[in-house]
């Protein structure tokens, strides 16, 4: 794949690089005396130098002949020199930051490139939203490599989104310089059933010679997994068990081992490497969804490398899993992912290998961060007004939340799982009061409603959830994957109404309410998903909201991320969308109230 993400194309500088390597021309930058983390051979090599010119690596080893009068020389004695990190699957919007602020947050942690799937903003604004994000990211040093959203909506027929993407749209984006592949193919039922529209989307990507990324969230490791991979899907980040990750690697699929803010899968999936004598080349480490508290408090890929080492993965292997393995997955290892001649000079200097302590970060040979601080300031970008007025929903009343019923009935209740993306379908006995079903805070059962907010259709999905530990109060958010309709859960209708109407008024965001009072609010005016404040300010606001969650009794890690998955109809077992309750095992609508248990 032709790399559009290096400052100077290799075709334009081969003679210069050769001259620098041979000592005929001076290098722009020389890093001396480092211990090289060689991800090509899985070696640590003492006392290595690197010469850089035109933003690329000209020579590795003894490069003293490349030092000239204008060469910047950095003494890296006692430090480890490694390729800068690549995140193979990330949704920028999940940080609630714009691309600019996201770049400012992750680059000091050693991240030089991300393969991002902007399907959140695409579900709200379509390809216009994708273009806005690409324009925003292009103003930063971060190599933001876009994978076109493949499933807008995520599972057709089960939800209403702000836009739709088809094979013609995907084919168009494959001609864009910033596009490197297809975003996660969540519609695995369409792949398995050989549905023509789904396979046409994959075909448009393959015809362009680009990578199809996956989302295979069911435990099947037999015919279904074979069919999914056979359709051309290159990688998958949805492994939650040791064997699901291992079986994917055994079939030549890149298993992207996830450790996000809410999805703590690494403790289990790392066993695919640590318990088996296998080559780890088909394993990557990715974040998927990371909120500001994690970015500010723990880090980005440096944090995930540390977690991998804690789970027993060798440090050099872990670094391979955020560098060369990722580049190979996307067919871009000819220019990214290693410290080697001709490659982009994307590098990190580490003061400690075991803890992946990042000191300096170079992108295209430019020192962009040191000591955890950015040294360059990306140009600002303003999202247009069309991206800031996306809540098309009239104020609601308690009548809009009502669930009619009589007597004692059996209800499908969605139970969330702490730290995991899955859910349980709990058939639960509930008794109506005054002709309707109400939340039961004493038994951790909250009412849930999903309001369509894109086109003013008036559709509302109503149901019940448990697992949050909240006895009194309400929570609402417009971050509700993947359609991002307005989701509210609560113990009483009055607080739920206040939560919904608060978000309508502020243009979207996250809110916590109790006893008629707003306890915490994070406005997200850009598509109802992001705010253009700094990561530090967003962290403070989200932390205040999480304190409000705790005041309500919630003990889940990253609870709003767990809540955001309630409507995502491609994750087992059941989900609630604006159209109703969905059985994600059989892909059919479920009645909320069952006739018989």
Image (cartoon, helix red, strand yellow):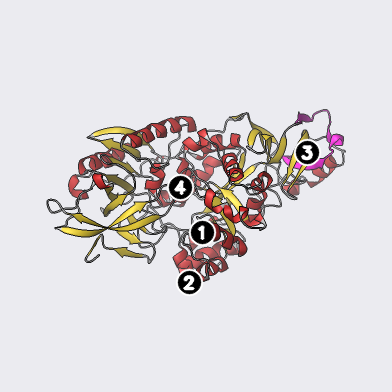
Assess whether mark 2 and mark 4 are in contact (beta carbons under 8 angstroms). no
Inter-mark Cα distance, 3 to 1: 40 Å
Work out whether 239 lies above or below 192: above
Mark 4 element type: helix
Q: Is residue 57 magenta?
A: yes
* Residue at the left extreme, as displayed: 434
Q: Which residue is mark 2?
A: 194
Q: Earlier in the sequence, mark 4 or mark 3?
A: 3
Q: Which x, y percent locates residue 332? A: 66, 53
Inter-mark Cα distance, 2 to 3: 50 Å
Which label belongs to residue 170?
A: 1
> Which region shows up in magenta?
51-77
Mark 1 closeness class: few <14, some 14–19, many ≥20 residues within 10 Å: many
Assess whether mark 3 and mark 2 are in contact (beta carbons under 8 angstroms). no
Mark 2 element type: loop
At 26% from the left and 62% from the top, the residue drawn is 591
Which label belongs to residue 456?
A: none
Inter-mark Cα distance, 4 to 1: 14 Å
Q: Which residue is mark 3?
A: 50
Q: Can you tell which of label 4 and label 3 is closer to the viewer?
A: 3
Q: Can you tell which of label 4 and label 2 is closer to the viewer?
A: 2
Inter-mark Cα distance, 4 to 2: 29 Å
Q: Can you tell which of label 3 and label 1 is closer to the viewer?
A: 3
Q: Which x, y percent locates residue 483? A: 38, 52
Mark 3 element type: strand
Q: Earlier in the sequence, mark 2 or mark 1?
A: 1
Q: Earlier in the sequence, mark 4 or mark 2?
A: 4
Q: Earlier in the sequence, mark 4 or mark 1?
A: 4
Inter-mark Cα distance, 2 to 1: 18 Å
Q: Quadrant of the N terminus?
A: bottom right
At 37% from the left and 33% from the top, the residue drawn is 547
Which label belongs to residue 129?
A: 4
């Amino acid at each position: 794949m032709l790399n559009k993400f290096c400052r100077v194309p290799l075709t334009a500088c081969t003679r210069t690089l050769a001259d620098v390597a041979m000592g005929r021309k001076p290098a722009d930058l020389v890093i001396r005396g480092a211990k090289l983390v060689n991800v090509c051979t899985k070696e640590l090599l003492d006392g290595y130098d690197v010469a850089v010119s035109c933003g690329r690596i000209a020579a590795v080893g003894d490069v003293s002949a490349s030092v000239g009068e204008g060469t910047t020389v950095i003494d890296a004695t006692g430090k480890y020199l490694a390729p800068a990190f690549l995140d193979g699957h990330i949704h920028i919007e999940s940080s609630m930051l714009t691309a600019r602020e996201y770049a400012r947050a992750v680059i000091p942690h050693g991240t030089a490139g991300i393969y991002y799937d902007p399907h959140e903003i695409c579900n709200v604004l379509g390809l216009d939203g994708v273009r806005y994000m690409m324009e925003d990211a292009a103003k930063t040093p971060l190599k933001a490599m876009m994978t076109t959203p493949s499933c807008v909506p995520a599972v057709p027929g089960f939800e209403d989104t702000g836009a739709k993407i088809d094979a013609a749209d995907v084919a168009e984006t494959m001609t864009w310089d910033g596009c490197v592949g297809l975003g996660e193919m969540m519609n695995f039922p369409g792949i398995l059933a050989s549905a023509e529209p789904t396979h046409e989307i994959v075909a448009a990507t393959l015809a362009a010679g680009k990578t199809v990324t996956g989302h295979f969230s069911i435990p099947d490791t037999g015919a279904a997994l074979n069919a999914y991979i056979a359709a051309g899907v290159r990688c998958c980040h949805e492994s939650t068990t040791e064997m699901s990750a291992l079986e994917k690697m055994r079939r030549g699929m890149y298993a992207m081992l996830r450790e996000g803010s809410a999805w703590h899968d690494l403790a289990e999936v790392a066993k695919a490497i640590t318990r088996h004598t296998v080559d780890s080349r088909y394993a990557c480490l990715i974040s998927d969804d990371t909120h500001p508290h994690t970015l500010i408090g723990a880090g980005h890929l440096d944090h995930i490398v540390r977690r991998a080492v804690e789970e027993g993965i060798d440090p050099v292997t872990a670094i391979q899993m955020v560098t060369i393995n990722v580049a190979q997955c996307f067919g871009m290892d000819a220019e990214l992912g290693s410290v080697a001649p001709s490659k982009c000079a994307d590098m990190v200097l580490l003061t400690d290998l075991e803890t992946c302590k990042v000191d300096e970060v170079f992108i295209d040979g430019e020192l962009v961060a040191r000591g955890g601080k950015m040294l360059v300031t990306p140009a600002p970008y303003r999202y247009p007004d069309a991206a800031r007025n996306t809540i098309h929903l009239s104020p609601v009343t308690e009548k809009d939340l009502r669930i009619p019923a009589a007597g004692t009935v059996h209800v499908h209740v969605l139970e969330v799982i702490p730290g995991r993306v899955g859910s349980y379908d709990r058939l639960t006995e509930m008794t109506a009061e005054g002709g309707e079903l109400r939340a039961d805070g004493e038994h951790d059962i909250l009412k849930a409603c999903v309001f369509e907010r894109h086109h003013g259709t008036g559709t509302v999905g109503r149901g019940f959830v448990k697992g949050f530990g909240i006895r009194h109060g309400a929570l609402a958010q417009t971050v509700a994957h993947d359609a991002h309709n307005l989701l509210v859960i609560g113990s009483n209708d009055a607080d739920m109404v206040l939560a919904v109407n608060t978000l309508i008024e502020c243009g979207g965001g996250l809110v916590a309410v109790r006893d008629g009072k707003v306890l915490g609010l994070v406005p997200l005016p850009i598509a109802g998903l992001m705010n253009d404040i700094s990561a530090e300010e967003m962290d403070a606001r989200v932390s205040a909201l999480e304190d409000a969650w705790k005041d309500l009794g919630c003990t889940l890690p990253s609870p709003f991320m767990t809540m955001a998955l309630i409507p995502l109809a491609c994750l087992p077992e059941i989900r609630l969308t604006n159209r109703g309750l969905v059985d994600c095992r059989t892909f059919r609508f479920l009645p909320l109230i069952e006739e018989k248990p």
